[in-house]
Amino acid sequence: MRIVIGADHAGFPLKGLVIDQLRAWGHAIDDVGTHSTEPVDFPDVAQALCAKILAGSADRGIMVCGTGVGACIAANKIPGIRAALCHDVYSARQCVEHDDVNVMCVGAQIVGDQLAYDLIKAYLAAEFSTEEHFRRRVAKLAELERRAAEQFGSGTGMPAR
């Protein structure tokens, strides 16, 4: 599988371990950064990662930041991306099976390397269900994105804080 991976500075150490494991499992890896512990902004990394998925050059994405929360928020701002924060194996599998998630977010300060490997293994092995009710719900998510784009344009209309 073609995997794109990205991390902010808090996720950088875990990202390196994950890349090594993914390669050992035979996956092709596209690393969009960061490449050090120097501070970076996770929205920039999320944008680069999601662009690879939307362009079709990656099958799935993995974002690693301190808690995974910021990475998940950033990725979900991009139409066509369905990101999930996963800190347990059940969610890592079910997010793909039920919600067709294409970006898994992990918190490096929350999970260790061994749990991260288990999460990623479950995420990558999962396939989107063919059951109609799951397909219908994911289609409704796409419709929400379309309506929001029509109603609000490229922004939400909300002022920045």
Image (cartoon, helix red, strand yellow):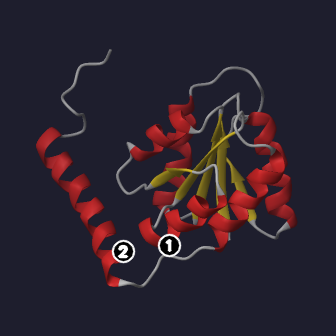
Residue labelled with disc 2: 134
Q: What residue type is disc 2 on?
A: Phe
**Identity of the residue furthest to the top in this view:** 161
Decide which of 9, 93 is in the foreground and name it.
93
* The N terminus: image quadrant: bottom right
Q: Are marks 1 and 2 in contact (CB under 8 Å)?
A: yes
Please determine whether, in this image, residue 132 is positioned above or below residue 50. Answer: below
> In this rendering, would 109 be left or right of 95?
right
84 on left or right of 112? left
Q: Is residue 52 left or right of residue 108?
A: left
Q: Residue at horizontal 32%, vertical 14%?
A: 161
Task: Choose top left, top right, bottom left or bottom right for residue 68.
Answer: top right
Residue 135 in picture, x, y percent from top left:
34, 76
- Can residue 32 be spotted in the picture? no
Q: Nearer the viewer, residue 36 or 115?
A: 115
In the image, residue 85 sits, relative to residue 160, either above or below, namely below
Q: Report the number of discs.
A: 2
Do we see residue 159 in this rendering? yes
Q: Residue at 45% across / 39% down in the picture? A: 73
Label 1 amino acid?
A: Glu
Give the image location of residue 39, x and y in percent. Answer: 67, 20
95 and 147: which is toward the camera:
95
Q: Residues within 10 Å of mark 1 (few under 14, many from 20)?
A: many
Q: Which mark is residue 128?
A: none
Q: Compared with residue 67, is residue 131 higher up or lower down, i.e. above or below?
A: below
Q: Looking at this rendering, what residue extends furthest in the left direction? A: 151
- What is the x, y in percent for residue 129? 46, 80
Looking at the rendering, which quadrant does residue 58 occupy?
bottom right
Q: Earlier in the sequence, mark 1 or mark 2?
A: 1
The residue beneath circle 1 is: 97
